[in-house]
Amino acid sequence: MNLTLARLNLYDQWYRVPNRNFNLPNQDTYDSLCQSIMDKYFYNVNLTNYEERQELFLVIILHSKNCFWVEKWIHKYVTDFRDSKFLKSHLSAFMHRSECNKVITIRDFVKSQLN
């Protein structure tokens, strides 16, 4: 599983790191791979089993432009990390950076968790 987590981190950041030229079409492909990997390996397990990777999961959710996927995962993220001391700061970052924060159901859900 550590290799899968390392692959997620690599794919998510491949064209986002400063020493590479950003290539949106290629990064979108990597983002889709991240979503597939998360669906396959992590949706049916409690994410707190990988608590040290909490921020990685959030960043992948945050970077996704697939708002249907984001809605499914933000609910899982909140459910699994409900007791995390980082949850509110992570959700606040999501609200400021995610393209999907404009979707009313997502925005309302995240706001309800911040109150």
Image (spheres, helix red, strand yellow):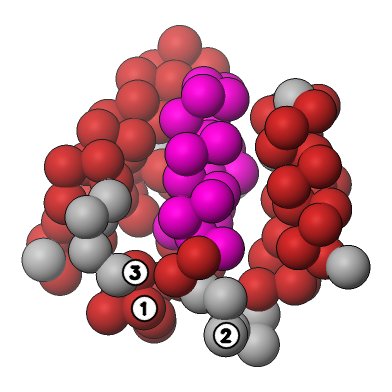
Q: Quadrant of the C terminus?
A: bottom right
**Left or right relative to 14: residue 92:** right
Q: Amino acid at mark 1?
A: Thr
Quick check: can you spot residue 6?
no
User: What is the number of the mark on residue 47?
Assistant: 3
- Residue 79 x/y as whole percent: 50, 65
Give the dominant element type of the magenta stretch: helix, strand or loop: helix
In the displayed orientation, state which residue is furthest to the top.
Answer: 25
**Left or right relative to 45: residue 9:** right
- Residue 67 x/y as whole percent: 57, 25
User: What is the number of the mark on residue 48?
Assistant: 1
Residue matched to label 2: 83
**Left or right relative to 33: residue 18:** right
Q: Amino acid at mark 2?
A: Asp
Label 3 to label 2: alpha-carbon separation = 12 Å
Vertical arrangement, residue 106 with respect to residue 84, above or below: above
User: Which residue lies at the image location 65% right of the left edge and 73% below the top edge?
Assistant: 87
Label 3 to label 1: alpha-carbon separation = 4 Å
**Magenta span:** 57-78
| Secondary structure under the numbered disc 3 in the rendered image | helix
Q: Amino acid at mark 3?
A: Leu
